Image (tube, helix red, strand yellow):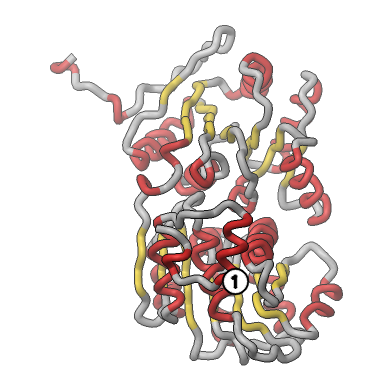
Amino acid sequence: MSFSALKLAEPILKALSDLAYSQATPIQEQAIPVILAGKDLIAAAQTGTGKTASFVLPILQRLNTDRKLRGKRIRALILVPTRELAVQVEKSISAYGQYLTLSSMAMYGGVDIEEQKQRLIGGIDILIATPGRLLDMAHQRALHFDELEVLVLDEADRMLDMGFITDINKIIERLPEQRQNLLFSATISDEVRALAKRSINNPVEISIKHNEASAPKIEQWLVTVDKDTKSALLSHLIKELEWDQGLIFIETKQGAAKLVSQLEKRGIPAESIHGDRTQSVREQILADFKSGKIQFLVATGIAARGIDIQNLSRVINYDLPDQVEDYIHRIGRTGRAGASGEAISFVAKDNFRNLCAIESHLGHVITRREFAGFEVRKAVPISILNYVPKNKR
C-alpha cells in the first residue's frame, strides 16, 4: 500500500518521498489508520519492520494543528529504554516532519540536565525520553503533563527487562486520563500485558508475524568454537572473508574492551560502546561507524535496540545471547528496510541450549560453517531440530 493511500498530509508525503519511501510496511499499513482514528493500540512487531514510522507518522499528522504550545508542556511523550534509541527516534521525527513546524527533543541521562531544562521552557510538541531522566525533570517541575495528548511505550519489553517498571508506573500516574495510548513491543509477554492493562483502554491489537519482517533477507550462519579461540577466529574471518564492516555483540563491557585490544594487536582497528562510556563519546563513535571511519564496532547487548545504521553489512554474535528476543533484535540491525544482510554467531558447547531455543523460534536450523585451523575440542551437539531417531537413520 502506498503512503498516500493512508491519507497522510502532503508535507509528510513530501518528506517520505525525499527519503525514497514509497510503500508502507505491514505494521505501518495496519497501525497508521488505527492511530489516526484516535484509538489505543498494542502492536507486536520485530526490529526492522518499520515500527518507528508506524507511530511517528500519524502522531505528526494528529499534532499538525494551530494549537499554541504552552511553556514546559508536551503534547506527545515517547518513552524508550536507551539513549541511543531516543536519539534514533528523534532523528526519524525530524526527517519525517521536516516540512512541519512541530518541535521535538530527545531527553536522556548522562548529559547536562540544565541544557535540557532550557529547551523545555518554551514547550516541546514531541518528547522522546528515557524513564529515569523524565522523572528527574518532573520532580524538578521542569515539565508538566497536563496537556499531553499521546503516550507511546516503545520497546516495552526491553524497558521491563531493564527494570523500568516502577519508573513507568510513576510516570503513568502523573499523566492525564484522557490521552491516546500506544504500546509497541517485539514480544507481548505476561509482564507487557500487565503493563498494558494498567495504561491502555480497549486497545486494538496488531501482531506482525516473524515471516512478514525483513529477517528472511538476513543470511544467518554460525561457527562452533572453543571459548579460548574466539578472538583469533574473529580476526581470521575478518581477514579471510574480507569483511568491510561489522557490528559485534558481546556480553560485558570488560569483554568489549579486551576484544578491541585483541583485534588491534592483530592489525584490525575497532572501537566499543557500552553503558560506562559518556554520551558524547558514544554518539561520536556511532557517527564514525555510520560514516565508515570505524569499520568494526564492539557493543554490549544494551545498545542493540538503539543502533540504526542504513545498509549495515553484518552483525556478529561474539557471545550468543541468553534470550531469543535479544538474538532477534541483534540480527535485526542488518537487513533493514528490504536490504540484505548477514548474521554470524559464535557458538561454544555451553551455548547449546540457547542455540536450540533460537532455532526453535526461527523454525529452522542455522547453517554451520567450519574453518581450517579452528576445529573445536569441545564439540557442540547436533541441533534438536535436526535430530533423526536411530530407527529412521
Q: Is residue 228 visible?
A: no
Q: Residue at x 68, y 17 (%)?
A: 239
Question: In the displayed structure, would residue 8 be above or below residue 68?
Answer: above
Relative image position of residue 172 (x, y in whole percent): 55, 81
Q: Residue at x 72, y 42 (%)?
A: 290
Extreme-left residue of the structure: 391
Relative image position of residue 94 (x, y in whole percent): 68, 65
Q: Residue at x 65, y 44 (%)?
A: 300
Task: Tell me the residue that label 1 is attached to.
Answer: 78
Which quarter of the rendered picture does the N terminus lie within?
bottom left
Relative image position of residue 48 (x, y in whole percent): 50, 49
Left or right of 389 in this view: 243: right
At label 1, which amino acid type do we have?
Answer: Ile
For residue 391, what is the image quadrant? top left
Does dot 1 land on a helix, a strand or a loop?
A: strand
Q: Residue at x 33, y 33 (%)?
A: 364
Which quarter of the rendered picture does the C terminus lie within?
top left
Mark 1 packing: few (<14 Cα in 10 Å), some, or many (20+)? many
In the foreground, 102 or 206: 102
